[in-house]
Image: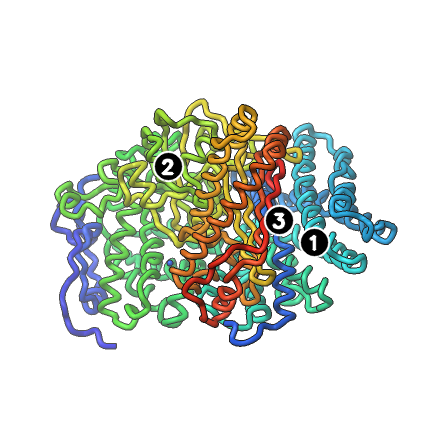
Amino acid sequence: MKSDSVIHKAVSPFLDSQNHSSLTDTGVVDENFSAHSHFESQTPFFSSYQELEGMDGASDPRQTEINALMSDLYVEEFNDEIYQLVAEASEFYHNRLPKHDAGDGELAERQAWRELETHFAPLHEDLEITLESMIGEVDAADLEGMSDQEKDLWVDSFFSGEGELEEEAPEIEHGWLKKKFRKARKKLKGIRKKVGKLVKKVGKKLSKPLLKVMLRRLKKFAKKLLIHVLQVASKNKRFPNRYRPLIAMLRKKLVKKEYADDVIQEEWVANSVASLQTELDYYLATGLLGEHAASGMEEELLELDSPHEETSWQDMEEARQLFVEQMLALEEHEDPAPHIEQFVTAILQAIRVIAQPVIAAVGRDKVIRYLAKYVSRITGKFIKKKNLNKLIATALVDVGLRLMKLEVQPEDEKIAATEALAGVVEDTVMNSLQLPAAVFENEQLLEAEVVAAFEKAAADNLPPMLPEEIYRKRPHLRPSGSMKNAWVQLPHRKSKHRKRCRCYKKAIKSPSRKISAHTAREIKTFDEVSLEMFLEEQLGIEIGGGLDAQIHLYEALPGTALFDIANQESYVPGLRSRHACNYNMLHPLTTHAAGLLLGEPALGRNVPAPYLMHRHCILPGQRFYFLEVPGVQPQTFLEEGSLRLRRPSKTKLSLDFIRNEIKIDLFISEKAAQSIAVDMREKQISPIASNKVVGILSDGLKQNFSQIGQNTIHVIHPSVIPGWGSGFALRRLPLYVIELLASSIQNWAVSALSKGLTNQMEQFVSATEHLEDGVMLSIQLVSIPGLDDIGKALGNVRNIHSHPFDGIPGSARLEIYPGYV
């Protein structure tokens, strides 16, 4: 590559020092920059300040059998329980750490880890006792003579009892610790019941010997599962580093062929708690089928002996803190470039999952070398500006830093300004990793693109500091628009103890807005649930006349989980609440949401569709918002001893290409179910009630087949890794086939629902009278016309007929259950 001929200069007002005399270079001449840079890029952040995203042939029968069994083992709610367990364990662990650095951080961490193990020890002990007791009773039980309902009751006799968890905490004297122990017991009952659901779902289909195999494997797996959950909670071990080998191994063993969607699914599943269930399902399935190849946790991956292994997010946080300290100690004429290069290298090491696509195409060494070179060159020229730190600090105060209800001292303002500079460097690297790989083959083009990446990072991290004239000409340099906002890193740095906390960013200003019902209906939160549905069904707000709310804005950093934000925002009314799932109050701030809520789309961040599906899995740089509404209490209910947030109406769709079946689970929220029950009681055959249920079903299926919702569909197929994320495989199909499939399923489901509901209105009303949350309607369609052809297409045999779904299913059945089943 040759880069020694001058082409042109990329104009950017941050690099031009002529616009304001109060900010000039330090006088140090960067000869390397002058000699080699052809983009002394005139970005305004360098100068102009004011003061302030198959099956070829027959499939392997063994592979098909494993996939089908893993799909049977899959329980979606298990992911929610594990995530909630991680959240609670994380809060418990970090509350045990000293608030201020007492000099021996490692000793404090070891002590906190021991308390965490003691706190959650009853979970493993109780599961072990329950499973061992059940194994001992299998031979004596007449399972062959039992109906499915009787088998369910037999399993419940083990998993629903009070058991050992009702005993008082041994040798606990302090009242607060006893209270914590009782709270833990309630959570453990919930986990135990989820394991019971798994046993009921699959165990009743097994012979006695296989049931005992399953129970023994569950017992063996339980402790390792718990240890890993606690390790994640205590140090936030990133799932990708631990589980990417497992998902890749499963793809080779189960799918045996690469598809375009596999890489997406591998990254997404490996980056979430779903990877734990994927491993558990594979571990159980292979054991039940007589395969002795152990799961990743036993052989493929090494179990960690110490809970204190360094992890990527910690490396990132330590590198960030070191860089801030280096910048604070930087002498007036000292070149910051070596420190920036060191920080850039640390960033690339810590976010290697995000950097993987570029690294795979270009090469790791080249990416690190080039980005370290150009990012340090461009940001270094910016950082060397005279009085820069003071000007940023003054601008942060002008935006409202002291109004954040934080105890901000003058020295903290200087630190906040330096952290903003670190954010500029960090986001410049992140933005550069979004570039096409071809850009890294042309140094001149790369440098120009790094300037653009820097400019965006500076606009996102720094308060408004440029002359209004520049903002009028280039409004994208002030994403907050007329709001004049800025972002600061939290928790606030009071001492070095913050290295044990997971950090995030928050916007200084939390604007107040009136949200109309139409606006709330158009905004989608996680899992394609509308903001209107969230407000009405989960917060109990009637939004017909509009809603006045204060909007708090947040941004994730590497290592951040949503429960980290929720647990540390103690001064925000309504977010730090007593119910367990306070992180469910946070919603994705996409550009669409930001435009409708705030009138400033640039404040939002768009991310790939999978990261808008569940709160379990988010990306660094992703933004979120919380609506503070005075006097509003989340709609909760008591489930298995704990307060839970009520669920919104939703539709779960399962496409079983192995058995040629389709299952639609329609959950109707408590509020909607009670309204429908009222209509049914008033009239024996109520078209209004039927229309309401059909409307919820239709809306749910539309969401299932949306760009985001497709990923939530459960696909059971020989060439698809079972479980969470299996819906990615539908991307292999032509768009028109997906549209035909969606239309046909909706017609079949509505027909089955209308006919079945007419004969089962009493069952529906009865289900609403139970204490469980909402009502579940389960529709099962069997012998689906055309589904075999679509299954072949997923396996890469594209012989789809022009009208593949002509006809009707061989049978359709509707069942109604109280609660979320």
| Type of amino acid at the residue the image marks with label 2 | Arg
Is tag 3's residue or tag 2's residue first in the polypeptide sequence?
3
- Tell me, for residue 230, which label it has, or none: 3
**Visible in this render: residue 352?**
no
| Residue at (47, 69) in percent of width and height | 259
In the shown orientation, is residue 226 left or right of residue 334?
A: right
Which mark is in front, 3 or 1?
A: 1
Looking at the picture, how far across and down is residue 266, in whole percent?
A: 50, 62
| Residue at (30, 43) in percent of width and height | 603
Looking at the picture, how far across and down is residue 186, in whole percent?
A: 67, 36
| Type of amino acid at the residue the image marks with label 3 | Leu
Determine which residue is flagged by label 2: 521
Looking at the picture, how far across and down is residue 698, in whole percent?
A: 45, 43
Q: Quadrant of residue 425?
A: bottom left
- Tell me, for residue 202, which label it has, or none: 1
Is tag 1's residue or tag 2's residue first in the polypeptide sequence?
1
In the shown orientation, is residue 393 left or right of residue 490?
A: left
